[in-house]
Image: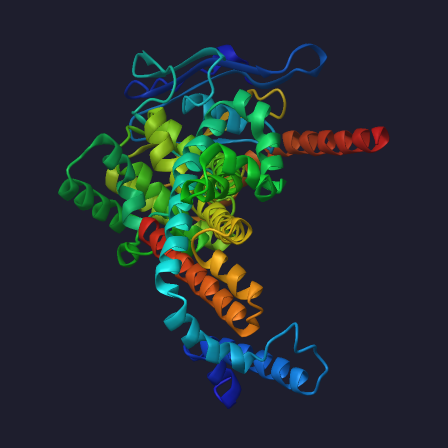
Amino acid sequence: MASPSDTRPGTSGDEPLLVVDNVYKRFGEGADATIAVDHMSFGVKPGEFVSVIGPSGCGKSTLFNIIGGLLGEYEGEVRIGSERIMGPHPAVGMVFQEESTFPWRTVIDNVAFPLELRGAPKSERLDKAHHFIDLVGLANFEKRYPSQLSGGMRQRVSIARTLVSEPRILLMDEPFAALDEQTRLLLGDKILQIQQQLHQTTLLITHNLTEAVQLSDRIVVMTYRPGRLKRIVNIDLPRPRTSEVVGSDAFGHYVAEIWSDLREEASRGMLDAEASVARRGARG
Amino acid sequence: MADRGGLPRLLAQRWFAPTFGLATIVAVFAVVEALLRADLLNRYILPFPSDVVLALGRVVTEENILSRMGDTAFEVLASGVLVVLVGVPAGALFHRFPVIRAALETWVAALAAAPVVLAFPLFLVLFGRGQKTIIVISFVYGVAPVLLKTLEGLSATRPVLINVGRSLNMTSSQMFWKILFPSAIPSIFTGIRLSWTFCLVTVVAVEFLVNLGGLGQLINDLAERYDLPGTYAGITFVILLSVAFFIVLERVENWLQPAP
């Protein structure tokens, strides 16, 4: 297993845009304390697509909230370029796991929302919103309300709303977790296409193996409690990619390789969950 | 599916529901009329529905109903607006400062359950025998639901929407006006609907009890004259007034937050 010291960000090519440096986060005190993130370090280079994968409960979402600036009070540093992140940073655009569109706004008003906050003139707001709605493939649904769209479409609205601010880093927390496998693969294609068009630097938090391999240049594998960095896997699948890559031998090879790392962690997570249910049962 | 019978198609018609509703009321009236005529109901307590319908015209021409309705409408509107102007900001305050909420929420809920109307003599002494008293009692009685529902709506804002706001570095005033408040609007309007019902009932009840002003006083007069059809005709105008208020309220809500 890799120790924190030899997991420095990849040194080939340009400097990383996003640096996670020795980040450590513990919840609670004493015997009840849980170490959610244990001295994680990695970097994301400009234009790169990196996924963080780990079993449920490994601290992925904590990491997401730390990088997004929603969770203060942690040890270590998150930097953008050389600037240390203190709280939400305009360079980071977040897409959340849960449904996060505003139900009282139409698609276009949802997407234009960040520009409205910034006080951009109306014509600019609409132009940009149009552009990004187009990009996520919802051109005909601008006047609809979220309740009139499917779950996958609503997630695309959220993605467009985040992209409209043109963040330097797109940070996503299992944005497709609630969707079925087929929709997920197709939305993956959409993400690949957007990534290619915008050269968007992206960090994706996920527990889904196929999704991670389908989309990423590199995958950061996390251990289960405490959430440590287990390994970084480079995915050398050709780009431009589509979901057809799922059928290739190389794809299967990567999935198997990462699963062999993840399997042990996931089983520990499962045993732990069972044990805590048993404990609760005994107490009750 | 293509060969659906006539009934489903009939049910889908836009006019069907309102017509059915009206027909139901007419049917209920007809049943009551029949029961009265068959002496199964006491006709000295319940008037013939047909007499009530005939009395509508008489009440309009002889009892100056429009100006009375105006009085009642003014009192309801004044207390209804006051209730919103005080209840919504107070609800927001309770939400913003958990200490206030912890201290007062239960008391406000208790106020909503208390029969404030019965304290009308106290209000008469404080505010005199006039519209002001009616408006104040109606306000006191009506303010709780709007306050509590505003608080509930703001508190029920989904955390992920607040996180979206935080990730966009929104100021707390932006957070309130652009996320919390719009998210609470459906709940706030549920509160206003409840409050306005309270206000209308209170206004008419106090008018009735104190023998003052609008429709409530008229109903009292007619009842004392033992004019049963007239009494019920008067009540019909109270219902019309309440319908008018709720139509306006629905318009306002739709304008504020268009439903998809």
Q: Is residue B40 left or right of residue A230?
A: right
Where does the C terminus of chain A fall, quadrant-wise?
top right
Residue A113 quadrant: top left
Position of residue A100 measured from the top left corner of the image (x, y, whole percent):
43, 41
Front residue of A63 and B232: B232
> In the rendered view, how is the structure colored?
rainbow
Q: Is residue A162 visible?
A: yes
Position of residue B254 measured from the top left corner of the image (x, y, whole percent):
35, 54
Is residue B148 placed above or below B27 in the rendered structure?
above
Query: What residue lies at 45% left-to-right and 59% top-to-bottom?
Result: B215
Residue A165 quadrant: top left
Position of residue A283 measured from the top left corner of the image (x, y, whole percent):
84, 28
In the image as oriented, which residue stretches furthest toward the right? A282
Query: What residue lies at 53% left-to-right and 59% top-to-bottom?
Result: B220
Query: What residue lies at 32% left-to-right and 37% top-to-bottom?
Result: A162
Q: How many marks?
A: 0
Q: Is residue B85 left or right of residue B94?
A: left
Where does the N terminus of chain A fall, quadrant-wise?
top right
Front residue of B122 and A73: B122
Front residue of B200 and B221: B221
Q: Is residue A133 left or right of residue B95?
A: left
Q: Is residue A243 visible?
A: no
Is residue B258 placed above or below B232 in the rendered structure?
above
In the image as oriented, which residue stretches furthest toward the front? B225
Query: What residue lies at 37% left-to-right and 49% top-to-bottom?
Result: A189
Position of residue B234 measured from the top left corner of the image (x, y, whole percent):
48, 66
Front residue of B175 and B99: B99
